[in-house]
Amino acid sequence: MGGATNLLDLIKKTRNRRIKVLIAKLGLDGHDRGAKVVARALKDAGLEVIYTGIRQTPEQVVETAIQEDVDVIGVSILSGAHIPLMTKLMRLLRERGLGDIPVFLGGTIPLPDIPKLKELGIRNIFLPGTPLRDIIKETLEAALERSRE
Amino acid sequence: MAKLYNDKSLKEIEERIKIWEKETLPKSLSRFPERMDEFSTLSNIKIKRLYTPLDVKDMDYMEKLGFPGEYPYTRGIHATMYRGRIWTMRMFSGYGSAEDTNKRLKFLIEHGETGLSLAFDYPTLVGIDADDPMASGEVGVCGVSVSSLEDMEIIFDGINMGEITTNMTINPPAPVLLAMYVATAEKQGVPYERIGGTTQNDPLKEFIAQKSYVFPPEPAVKVAMDVVEWSVKNLPKWNPISISGYHIREAGSTAVQELAFTIANGIEYVRHLINRGMNVDDFAHRLSFFFDAHINFFEEIAKFRAARRMWAKIMKEWFNAKKERSMWLRFHTQTAGVSLTAQQPYNNIIRTTIEALAAVLGGTQSLHTNSLDEPFRVPSEFAAKIALRTQQIIAYETGVADTVDPLAGSYYVEWLTDKMEEEAWRYIERIEMMGGMTEAVKRGYPQREVTEASFRFQREVEEGKRYIVGVNIFVEKEDEEIRNVPLLDINQKEIEERQKKRLKRLREKRDKSRWEASLNKLHKAAERGENIMPYVLEAVKSYATLGEIMGTLKEVYGVWVEPPIY
């Protein structure tokens, strides 16, 4: 698979700079299994990970992103409330001048909602079953692109 | 003593196996090398190639199995099991407004459901009102929104609460929701003796998994035990607690951890109630349990059988229970939501069928079968009906319910039942040494164990050591099903607006002085450490909202903030 070499190249390219990722549980749901597994996988891949814990409001996530000066944000929602919550988060990020931070979303997301979420500016949506390797790769790519800009 | 095998037979079998290993086995192995170097259950218990009487050679039939309806209840808590009565088919359901859910419950009853089970939305689960800013976007999405007695009255409009039992999956706000249920039944004219059902009300597992905690561990247990104490005295048919392994498992634990942590939680609650001065035989028969039925078929069946045996032993030997019913582990089962895939979603019907079968062969008292569309959203009517029909087919077509505990005596199942029990005891010992589950939870011990296990499982899937059809084997590039599966349409904004308006009206029209007095009395009772249930009931009847009642209790008990562990 080409994926493997790609990922290695990416890890090499990003080795000398510290990439910081915010993993956030937005809203009231307590399903933190996916968020924790992703946080752990990114950490094992050499990234610096800030995990917010559960029940975060969009305001809190934006505040943490500013304070921690993160390169990428990964949001996990399994409550079905992704449209209103992500709409608000993306708006707040733009308002606070963080519109260029790549944002990913993972969780139980019905397919028909994906175009709407992409329109909001979310870089990609990871459905259940997404390999961790893909998540790591896309996170690194997004961080690299942003630093080149 | 009731040993199953005599030494002479065992010796012969042992000799014959040696010959089999020398003559028959190698031929097979050279023609068909085995698929893996090592086979293991989801709890990483190594599975042998073949099980024979030698694997259960020391088994004492009366001590380990006995007869159904008798100690240690390994074979079931009732003598005739499903020959007498099929398990309760209880579909977890609820979405949108109280009106939407009322309609769905009536639909399920019409199609042969025999018990109700309410799913609440997130604001309700964490004890805030639909008009709380934190609730925005979540009202009515993954369950029904209940902010006051008025909502409960609408949910049960036209449903006779004296005739059907209801489970409510609710934890920190359990006293409030139970009070709403009781007040609604009272209005229907149903006497307390006929109000039947369950409140989940299991706070410790909230810290390990599910995570709808509100109060810190100690007051959380105190409040939950208030519900148990009050119910035992006032509602003889109510199961005030459902000690739940389900969420622990869904959060990523192994089957052994699910078994061990659930029983350790149970032990903690029994101790708390005894410390209140209650007699074990006055409440133990009202404790109920809730387990996951995952996809590793035999391991699940072994887990259910081991659970019954362990609990009976604990109640009898640790807590000196005398009544038979105090030793029963009665349980509800739900098939594993986490085993379902978004990819090729119709395959989920098959997974659910196999899991439901394991629950039935494990002797469950009631069962929820997941719908094929649950990786995306709460089920559509179409999907919920297939899930209900799955249970009906198992019950009425397959014949598996026609004899009691049909897998007993299987060398593998009995060996595995023993193995699950043995490994679960080891966890329980560790938790006991920490001073019980409340203490273990405060130290983050079960949380870390579950997190580790879920990461290990994910890694095994990524490395191709575990297969999931449609995810890492038999993957379809163009997945037509995922695109075409019909989903329930929820008009979230409209539901939220309607709920907000209803609450506004309610706050205007209720009797202000009665409402205020009820909350003040509740506050004082909580401060004095009294059982809060009578005060919650009065507050509910004076139309205090869920958020107001929980807010009053938070002032006294505080709130829990979890240290993030990953």
Image (cartoon, grey):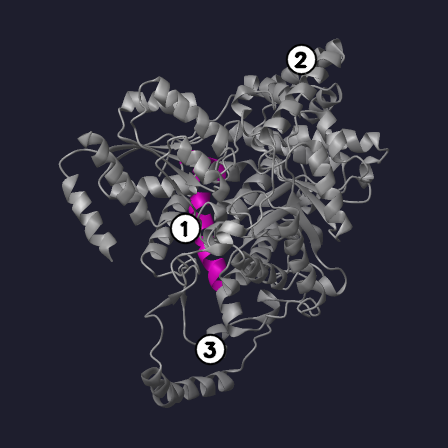
B281 to the left or right of A73: right
> Residue at position x 70%, y 68% from top?
B397
Residue B53 falls left or right of residue A103: right
Instruction: Measure how far apart labels 2 and 1 are at the Cα level.
Output: 50 Å
Q: Position of residue B285 (x, y in %)?
A: 69, 47
SS at mark 2 in the image: helix
Q: Which residue is mark 2?
A: B520
Q: Residue furthest top?
A: B513
Label 1 sits on a secondary structure element that is loop
Q: Which residue is mark 3?
A: B54
Q: Nearer the viewer, residue B257 or B530?
A: B257
Q: Which residue is mark 1?
A: A129
Q: Left of B347 or right of it: where is A15?
A: left
Residue B418 highlighted magenta (yes or no) = yes
Q: Tell me if B368 is positioned left or right of B59 in this view.
A: right
Q: Could you tell me residue B396's position as x and y percent?
A: 72, 65
Q: Amino acid at mark 1?
A: Gly
Which chain is indicated by disc 2?
A: B
Label tally:
3
How far apart marks 3 and 1 lie (CA) works out to 41 Å
Residue B135: which quarter of the image?
top right
Check the image and name the residue furthest to the right. B189
User: Counting residues from the N terminus, which is met first, the one under dot 3 or under dot 2?
Assistant: 3
Quarter of the image where one finds residue B81: bottom right
Q: Quadrant of residue A53?
A: top left
- Residue range highlighted in magenta: B417-443
Instruction: Name the mark nearer the viewer: 3 or 1.
Output: 1
